Amino acid sequence: MSKVAIYPGTFDPITYGHIDVINKGLKLFDKIVVAISDVENKDYLFNSEERIHIVKKALFSDLKFNKKKIMIISFTSLTTDLCKKYKSNIILRGLRAVSDFEYEFQLAGMNRKLNNQIETVFLMSDVENQIISSRFVKEIVKLKGNIKKFTTKNTIKMLKDKYE
């Protein structure tokens, strides 16, 4: 039986930090479901269809990841319900800095309470990607800064199109 990990997030937009976690996750799991959150209480730059498109372009066009090993979906449910739907007992999460840990620790605990069969696996991106956040990438591009070190070519194009 193949090991499937659910990697939930907003991916608004996807960055090299996210991509680093996906790449490392592919070494541990047979398939990763990149689950793009579409809850209503968030203020997204891109809607869920745009984020799916951006993630697909980044992973499959820019970086040539194996389409058989990655599924990209949007969701509005609990992550634990997604795990059930995709027959996974693994939630994959990325950690950048100590500041992420408290939130991620609480989230993992809540998910464990919702379904004690689910484990959360934390992966750290490489040092050069740990400082990257979608929020900073959006702010830099909005101010006409260079974001080539932070995300892929197609993602940059979509961001620039959004702000022009």
Image: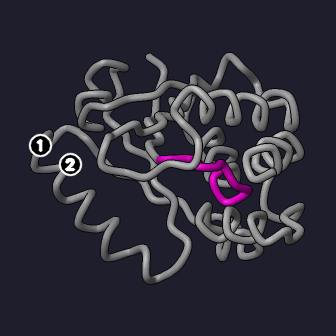
Query: What residue is rendered at 46% in x and 28% in y?
Result: 74
Where is residue 6, by image quadrant? top left
Under mark 1, the amino acid is: Leu
Numbered range of the magenta stretch: 10-18
Query: In terms of secondary structure, where does tag 1 sit?
Result: helix
Which mark, residue 111? 2
Is 101 left, or right, of 22 in this rendering? left
Q: Residue drawn at (43%, 74%), measured in percent from left and top?
A: 100
Q: Which residue is mark 1?
A: 114
In the picture shown, does residue 99 fall above or below 14? below
Question: 10 Å neighbourhood of mark 1: few (<14), some, or many (≥20)?
Answer: some
The kind of secondary structure the magenta stretch mainly shows is: loop
Q: Residue at x 79, y 55 (%)?
A: 151
Marks 1 and 2 close (CB-CB < 8 Å): yes
Query: Which one is nearer the viewer's eye here, 43 or 74?
Result: 43
Which residue is rendered at x = 69% and y = 49% of the image? 19
- Relative to residue 64, is residue 127 drawn left or right? left
In this picture, is 111 found above or below 2?
Answer: below
